[in-house]
């Protein structure tokens, strides 16, 4: 039996933080060994809100470098950019024609944009159909994403079912793979780490930035000797991700017994966080120096992705009546 298929897209939208890493990015690294994987940078989706060509291109390349730096292996994963497989727009169009406006009006992202009185382009409205095409074009079995993408996967499944009903069995229904919320990293203020809260720590942050961010984490005012509840402390919440095994257990005991101050706990966190981030940052720097290698990975990925997509589209075109034989 051939391997199951994983498909996921990453929107190029600025620098990743450690919350992104433990939220969605890490999943790819773990799953790449057991699936036939297609991971693309969703530059066509990004065009709905980034309309500055230099910035879009720069962000796209940055994401490719980020993923290679954290260990995505281009020998195992077909890594490419979405716009290199323009067939996806053709399939998106076909989905547009079998989808109603009221159905798309139910999308959270669209409703949010409306509630905020934002100007909504047709691309934003139609975002879920392009995403359905992204996923169904490669016959995905699973789609690893963040929790915010759940509705999009439901739309994808509905669209596959609708097409299958109208034109005969063609698309497989994909399952979402969403990391459990225990994996949610708190930001420097204790809320979920998110760019919109301005409480992030960069995945590739230099040491001084790590130190500054950790030192800014608010704590209560308990003195060094007082017992502390580790589960109520924002510093400890981050230790869960960066401090391992016996050191972590010992830290918990010291919190509960009293005898460790927040300053010491922060210093320990800075050290361990830096131990995790430094090799990633150095790897990223060295990959970024060889831009042409990165472009080559994306080009080879595009060739493989187009090949797969073409086969599927042949079938789809015949099913809808684009073939005149
Ligand atoms: N919408 C996703 C996001 O904002 C990006 C994306 C585009 C995607 N196409 C996809 C994710 C297909 C998974 C599968 O993060």
Image (cartoon, helix red, strand yellow):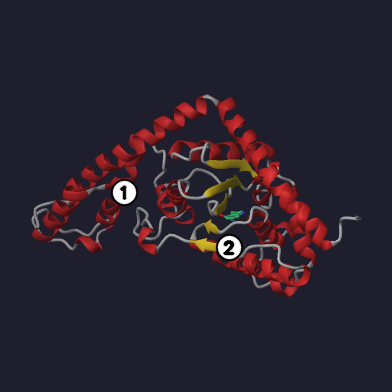
Q: Where does residue 291 sit, x and y in percent of width and height?
A: 57, 27
- Measured as percent of width and height from the top left, residue 140 is found at 59, 56
Disc assigned to residue 153: none
On whether ligand 1 comes within 8 Å of the CB at mark 1, the answer is: no
Image quarter for ligand 1 equals bottom right
Q: What residue sits right under mark 2 in the picture?
A: 174
Furthest-front residue in view? 1
- How packed is label 1: few (under 14 Cα within 10 Å), some, or many (20 or more)? few
Mark 1 or 2: the one toward you = 2
The image shows residue 213 at horizontal and vertical percentages of 34, 45
- Cα distance between the residues tagged 1 and 2: 42 Å
Can residue 223 be seen at all in this image of the molecule?
no
Neighbour tally class for label 2: few under 14, some 14-19, many 20 plus, Cα within 10 Å:
many
Q: Is mark 2 within 8 Å of ligand 1?
A: no
Q: Position of residue 202 (x, y in %)?
A: 42, 43
Q: Residue furthest right?
A: 324
| Residue at image point 11% right, 53% down | 224
When the figure is inspected, residue 219 is found, relative to residue 150, above or below; the finding is: above
Q: In the rendered view of the protein, which quadrant contains the C terminus?
A: bottom right
The answer to whether the residue labelled 1 contacts the one labelled 2, judged by CB atoms less than 8 Å apart, is: no
Secondary structure of the residue carrying numbered label 1: loop
Question: For residue 114, which quarter of the picture?
Answer: bottom right
Q: Residue at 75% across / 71% down in the picture?
A: 101
Residue that badge 1 annotates: 216
Q: In this image, 311 relative to 25: left or right? A: right
The tag earlier along the polypeptide, 1 or 2, is: 2
| Snapshot quadrant of residue 256 | bottom left
- Secondary element at tag 2: loop
Residue at the extreme bottom of the image, as rendered: 102
Give the left or right position of residue 325, taking residue 121 as reference.
right
Is residue 240 found left or right of 199 in the rendered image?
left
Q: Confirm whether residue 319 shows in the render.
A: yes
């Amino acid at each position: 039996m051939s391997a199951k298929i994983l498909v996921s897209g990453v929107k190029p939208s600025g620098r990743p933080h450690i919350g992104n890493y433990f939220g969605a990015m890490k999943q790819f690294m773990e799953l790449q060994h057991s699936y036939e994987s297609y991971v693309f940078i969703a530059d066509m989706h990004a065009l709905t809100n980034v309309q500055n060509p230099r910035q879009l291109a720069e962000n796209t390349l940055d994401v490719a470098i980020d993923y290679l730096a954290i260990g995505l292996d281009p020998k195992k994963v077909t890594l490419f950019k979405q716009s290199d497989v323009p067939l996806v727009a053709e399939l998106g169009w076909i989905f547009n024609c079998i989808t109603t406006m009221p159905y798309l009006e139910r999308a959270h992202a669209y409703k949010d944009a409306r509630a905020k009185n934002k100007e909504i382009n047709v691309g934003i409205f139609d975002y879920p159909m392009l995403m359905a095409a992204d996923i169904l074009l490669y016959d995905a079995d699973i789609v690893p994403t963040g929790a915010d993408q759940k509705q999009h996967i439901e739309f994808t499944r509905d669209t596959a079912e609708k097409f299958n009903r109208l034109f005969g069995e063609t698309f497989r229904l994909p399952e979402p793979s969403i990391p459990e919320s225990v994996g949610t990293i708190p930001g420097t203020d204790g809320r979920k780490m998110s760019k919109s809260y301005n409480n992030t720590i960069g995945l590739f942050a230099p040491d001084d930035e790590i130190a500054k961010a950790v030192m800014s984490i608010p704590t209560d005012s308990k003195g060094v000797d007082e017992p502390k509840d580790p589960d109520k402390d924002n510093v400890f919440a981050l230790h869960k991700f960066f401090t391992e095994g016996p050191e972590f257990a010992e830290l918990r005991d010291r919190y509960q017994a009293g005898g460790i101050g927040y300053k010491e706990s922060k210093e320990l966190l800075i050290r361990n966080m830096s131990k995790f981030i430094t090799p990633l940052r150095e790897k990223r720097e060295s990959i970024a120096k060889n831009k042409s290698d990165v472009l080559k990975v994306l080009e080879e990925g595009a060739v493989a992705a187009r090949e797969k997509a073409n086969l599927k589209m042949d079938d789809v075109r015949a099913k809808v009546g684009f073939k005149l034989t």
